[in-house]
Amino acid sequence: HPYNLQAYSEVPHIEVVTPTKEGGGTALMLCQQLSAVEIWRVETVDGSRSVKQKLAQGKEGQPLEAKASPRLLAVLSSASNVFSSALSPDGKHVAYANISALHLYSLFDSEGKLN
C-alpha cells in the first residue's frame, strides 16, 4: 500500500518583539512557514511579557486578547524551504535562511517609518 511520507515535517516558528515607539510600539509577530516568512502587526491587550509567555514552547494554543484584528505587513516568499528566521530585538529587521542564501530585510524605510 502506498504511504504519504514527508522527508521532514513543517516546524512552526513564531517570534514576537515589541519595536521602538517609532514603529508604533505595537508587537510584531514573525510566523515562519515552510516556504515563506510572514510578518504581522498585533495590538494586544496583554503586555509584551505576557504575550511572550503565552507563545512559549508548549503554550502555543493560549489565546491573546487583541485590540484589533492582526494585520499582515509582509510575506517574504522563498524559492526553497525556509530553515531559520528571526526578527531583530528592536523590530526593525527580519532575516531568514534557505538552502541557497541568507536574506536580510529592513521593515522600515529611510525615514524610519514602518513599510
Image (spheres, helix red, strand yellow):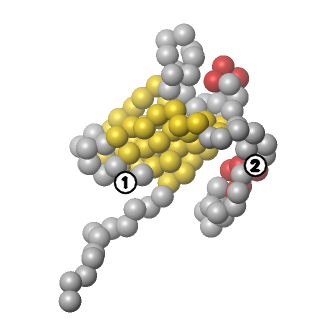
Q: Is residue 62 above or below residue 51?
A: below
Q: Which residue is mark 1?
A: 34
* Residue sticking out furthest to the left: 1
Q: Quadrant of the N terminus?
A: bottom left
- Residue 115 versus residue 93: which sits nearer the camera? 115
* Residue sticking out furthest to the front: 69
Q: Amino acid at mark 2?
A: Glu
Mark 1 neighbour class, 10 Å CA radius: few under 14, some 14 to 19, many 20 or more: some
Residue 13 on image: x %, y %: 50, 54
Residue 28 visible from this viewpoint: no
Secondary-structure class at tag 2: loop
| Quadrant hosting residue 63 | bottom right
Residue 6 on image: x %, y %: 29, 70
In the rendered view, does 82 fall on the left or right side of 11? Answer: left
Residue 40 on image: x %, y %: 56, 39
Q: Is residue 4 above or below residue 115?
A: below
Residue 113 visible from this viewpoint: yes
* Residue sticking out furthest to the top: 111
Q: Amino acid at mark 1?
A: Leu
Q: Is residue 7 above or below residue 43?
A: below
In the rendered view, does 21 fall on the left or right side of 13? Answer: right
In the rendered view, does 82 fall on the left or right side of 51? Answer: left
* CA gap, disc 1 and disc 2: 27 Å
Q: Residue at x 49, y 16 (%)?
A: 109
Q: Earlier in the sequence, mark 1 or mark 2?
A: 1
| Quadrant hosting residue 112 | top right
Residue 33 on image: x %, y %: 42, 52
Camera-near label (1 vs 2) is 2
Q: Which residue is mark 2?
A: 65
Q: Residue at x 78, y 46 (%)?
A: 46
Q: Are marks 1 and 2 in contact (CB under 8 Å)?
A: no
Secondary-structure class at tag 1: loop
